[in-house]
Image: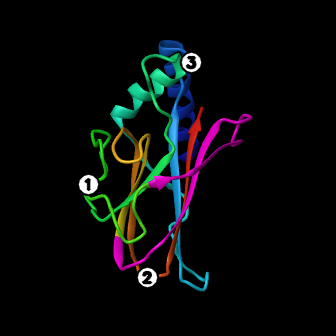
């Protein structure tokens, strides 16, 4: 049965290439580690696939073509809402704006996943100054507004003062 499914998937992939030609795909993945003030790992989400937003496609195409005044995605934000992800979302559902966990610039780099420099990586460490329950994370192209590239539910993470939230977000272009 698995061999049949594999053959069908390969056939569909060939048909898509014939019908639609080559295309660029963006896949987002995020991993969040929660550490206590001593640096001990309390929990890790492991790598989770995120949802790319519809609004981000216009920004990405503008960046590729150097059209209009587009800004690169270089900010990460955390939120407290567990509403299901949707490509139609344009913001986190309940973005955190205090407690040391507010939106912030990430360390941005290119990494290699399949081809040289095919992956955009954003990395950020927040240190909580109060207690919060984190449910969502997103990537943005502005320090306070802007477009959201991707959003992911984090599973509930309750952090207290002194805890660190370490996020690594990757966008693979293939």
Dominant secondary-structure state across the stretch colored magenta: strand
Q: Which quadrant would residue 149 be assigned to in this image?
A: top left
Q: Tell me, yes or no, whether the highlighted magenta stretch contains residue 148.
A: no
Q: Is residue 83 above or below residue 116?
A: below
Res 114 → quadrant = top right
The residue identified by callout 3 is 22
Mark 3: few, some, or many residues within 10 Å (few <14, many ≥20)? few
Within the image, what quadrant is residue 166 found in?
bottom right
Q: Nearer the viewer, mark 1 or mark 3?
A: 1
- The residue under label 1 is 93
Please tell me whether mark 3 sits on a helix, a strand or a loop: loop
Residue at the spot 50% in from the left edge and 27% down from the top edge: 12
Q: Earlier in the sequence, mark 3 or mark 2?
A: 3
Image location of residue 28, percent across then percent down: 50, 45
Callout 2: helix, strand or loop?
Answer: loop
- Residues shaded magenta: 104-133
- The residue positioned 46% from the left and 22% from the top of the image is 61
Q: Give the spatial CA distance, label 1 vs label 3.
A: 35 Å
Q: Is residue 114 magenta?
A: yes
């Amino acid at each position: 049965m698995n061999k049949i499914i594999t053959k069908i998937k390969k056939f569909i992939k060939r048909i898509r290439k014939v019908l639609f030609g080559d295309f660029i795909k963006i896949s987002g993945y995020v991993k969040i580690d929660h550490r206590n003030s001593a640096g001990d790992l309390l929990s890790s989400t492991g790598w989770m696939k995120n949802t790319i937003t519809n609004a981000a496609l216009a920004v990405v195409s503008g960046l590729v073509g150097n059209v209009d005044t587009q800004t690169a995605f270089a900010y990460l934000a955390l939120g407290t809402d567990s509403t299901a992800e949707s490509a139609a979302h344009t913001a986190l559902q309940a973005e955190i704006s205090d407690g040391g966990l507010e939106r912030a610039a990430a360390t941005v780099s290119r990494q290699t996943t399949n081809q040289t420099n095919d992956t955009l990586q954003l990395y950020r460490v927040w240190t909580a100054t109060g207690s919060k329950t984190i449910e969502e994370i997103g990537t943005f192209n502005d320090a306070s507004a802007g477009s959201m590239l991707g959003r992911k539910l984090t599973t509930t993470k309750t952090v207290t003062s002194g805890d660190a939230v370490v996020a690594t977000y990757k966008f693979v272009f293939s």
